[in-house]
Amino acid sequence: MLTSRKYLTRSARFAAVAAIAVASTFGVAAQATDITGAGSSFVYPVMSKWSAAYAEKTGNHLNYQSVGSGAGIAQIKEGTIDFGASDAPMKAEDLQKYGLGQFPIVVGGIVPVVNITGVQADQIKLDGVTLADIFLGKITNWNDPKIAALNAGLTLPAGKITVVHRSDGSGTSFNFTNYLSKVNPEWASKIKFGTAVEWPTGVGGKGNEGVSQYVRQIKGSIGYVEYAYAVKNKLAWVDLKNASGNFMKPSADAFAAAAATADWASAKDFNLIMTNAPGAQAWPITATTWMIMYKTPKNAGNSKVAFDFFKYALENGQKAASDLDYVPLPAPLVSKIEAYWASEYKH
Amino acid sequence: MSSPYLRRRITNALAMVMSTLATLVGLAFLAWILWETLRQGISALDLKLFTKITAYGESGGLANAMVGSLIINFIGIAIATPIGVLAGTWLAEYADRTRLGESIRFLNDILLSAPSIVMGLFVYTIIVLPTTVLTHGSTTFSGFAGGVALALIALPVIVRTTDEMLRLVPSTLREAALSLGVPQWKLTLQILIRAARSGIITGVLLALARISGETAPLLFTAFGNNYMAINPIEKMSSLPQIIYQYANDPGDAMHALAWAGAFVITMFVLLLSLASRLILSRTKVSHD
Amino acid sequence: MPANQAALPIDILEQRSHRDARHERLFRWLLKGCALIVLASLLGAAGATLWGGREAFSAFGWHFLVSSAWDPGNDVYGAVVPVYGTIATSLIALLIAVPISFGIAVYLSEVAPAWLRTPVASAIELLAGIPSIIYGMWGLFVFAPFFANHIKPWLTNNLGNKPDDGKLSWVAEHVPFVGKLFGSDYPFGASILVAGIVLAVMIIPFISSVMREVFQTVPTRLKESAYALGSSTWEVSWDIVLPYTRSAVIGGIFLGLGRALGETMAVTFVLGNAMHLSASLLDPGASIASTIANQFSEATGLQKSSLMALAFLLFVVTFVVLLIARLMLRQLARKEGR
């Protein structure tokens, strides 16, 4: 047993060494600029691909985490991140109050999917009113005359419809319910639209993956997921009637048509929800995600790198986006966005 | 054989069978879950899981998430263990049956059931936001904040188990030491804690097992990092968060990575618990 | 006293006792400080949720506690559905986990041969190391479909009030409540019962580890005296070991209960997340933790405040449950003359 004095000096020396070792790790400086973004999970895959390519090109690291659009907005307001990503546009008063600007970055589609014995993808057709009635719980059987009226030539079994919706708040729900509100007045007055609503019927799956799983497992179910999930999970999607009256199947071209025909010119701060777009070849439930940044940056260096990244993504990231089943923004829209940067943001 | 004796024999046999069945049920679920995890994750279990950092698609690994998890869990347990053991000791030795002791014990049990996301938000408010303001935005989220959030989750577990284990040490030990003139603090530190050591370590391991699988508290504290980070001041990735992220992805390659990551966590906890049992078993305290 | 004279024994003793008293005080302060940190954490966390939920409480008042609405579109929220789900799932989890954990603890301390003890104990503890999200994923992908295909039809047809062929079984007709509890016309597995079962598997390792540890601390003298008088193994476990370790066993059960009440990820995947109140255990529901986890990232304004109010209510629910448990224990102790 060491006597107390020896023990004291020994432990003091050990403590000093440990302290120095710990302190030295704190001094490591970052070589390149690290920027942080957070928000929508819709764009997580394409953000990851873009940031990897960008890091290879410039050495700057982009850290994007999908914590949800609401959390992304909250965090950009608190200044803990460099840019936020939201599936729902911020209102003009909010942008004004916090000194923020927003612009779209990529487009994707949301598709209703079904699990009916004997029905493949592209076989069943629905229009907005019927779709909303199903989700309202007013149409409860697959052999309902309203569905049969749209599907001459397709025999539908007499099964109960199980509605699958999202249990978590999400931009996918936001756009889906927004579409239902635009086409079905009962939905608009009773349920309205939002990232989470009071679903009148059905079961809630967590995330697009949860909804996909439920639709796969439950016979006679209908749900809604992002296009990439329908493709990868080989779900049977529904052809929808768009605003021009054509029944469209979901595809990159249909989403692009919706993005092209949407009226961006009259939307200040790009505040335009693209559902039920007027184009003849447009897919009715097309969505975009907005990047939100401070007009006067809190950290000028980070802000500059962020804009450089977005420029790279908009101008060079088209292939990466379409590989992941997104639709890159059309060129006129890209020029509009870059003009917005020049006029609204201080560099 | 008289009837009561037969009845007792039957009850005993029945009880032994039921307890064996209960164990088999527990083991069956374990095997089922592990089998599923392995089956789904086997395609991603290779060396690059440990050497490459997270990247979208099939070329990525989980190296930065593993390192981040190790660091954040270590910080969490390093903060929670001394505070928890000392608090549990106070409850058992100095405040047993006092008003304050009973209240803190009660409140500690309430803390046990707090949803982990609430702890994360609490730490966000008291550490992340002030740090952002104080450092003018250069440090916001950090692995350290994540560690504190995990410590708050681990703390009540350690307090509870330390408290209970110390109270089970027979008073003969205490009285023998006191009668020899050992001051109470020495008695507590060198005799009682050593006697209850096995139980306390179990508590710490249970707490570690619990926090190594937590996602929600890290979302708003450690935030996550797509690149390798070893400095706790930086944002850090963690395995549970990556698993959560990848589980929600449409692709199967990402799913396999998620299951593989889960398998790694489980094996890590297993190894740690086996190692600590091995170290403990050399000095087993006998209870007579 | 001259410097070259050795100190008297009495002086040394006095010095030592002063030093010991000082160390004693320091030690006591240190310990108390740590305990107060625990107190501060709880008050901080509970206070943060109360503060976050103030908007909801002032908007809805007491109505929040009895309303089963949850309408983000019209901004009306109520706590009944999540609170019911939390209590129901945790209760089911405890009902399943406590007997199984006790069985495991008895097996490991009395029945198992010595060479089998450590492997089986480590295996059971492994259940604690599986991340909760894996429980959720396993539940969603594997267990819930299995339950829906093999167990649920049996339950709804033999015990429920909505059997497939329309004929109620004897049990459903004559035993009260059973029909309502097991009647369901949903074709999938996500339900309160499945969430309760998954929770039970999650908390078994916590309860059984603590039980096993404390069973080992029972003095062998006590057990051997009982054996010497002719007790069987079961009688020793039930009548000697359990009462001796009762307080610690209750502590272990509280550990499991705490985990069950606050568990987020696993429950979210298998509970079905339907904000409708249903009497049936086989219908989907919602719990406080899963509701918060699901909606927090996207919530703003009154919805966010309502979620924080729900979190505060979880503290309250835990408080009430523990209070009831403690009062029951005190009654028991009083009967035994303590």
Image: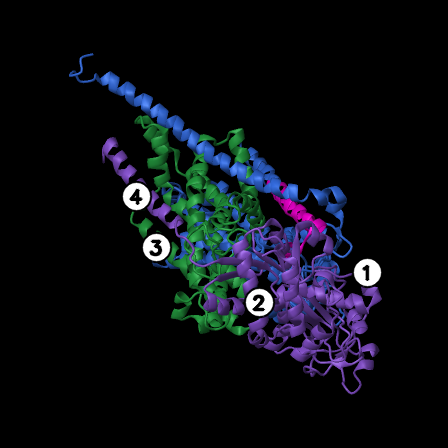
Chain colours: A purple, B green, C blue
- Residue A311 — which label? 2
Q: Residue at x 46, y 57 (%)?
A: C129
Question: Callout 3 environment at 10 Å: few (<14), some (14 to 19), or many (20+)?
Answer: few
Label 2: chain? A
Residue B156 placement (x, y as % from top left): 50, 43
Mark 2 is on which residue type?
Lys
Residue C81 placement (x, y as % from top left): 71, 53
For the residue pair B204 and C47, the one nearer the viewer reads as: C47
**In this figure, which residue is indicated by the disc labeled 4?**
A17
Residue A294 visible (yes or no): yes
Which one is in front in this view, the residue at disc 1 or the one at disc 2? 2
The residue range painted magenta reads: C294-322
**In this figure, which residue is indicated by the disc labeled 3?**
B275
**In this figure, which residue is indicated by the disc labeled 1?**
A190
Mark 1 is on which residue type?
Lys
- Residue B92: quarter of image: top left
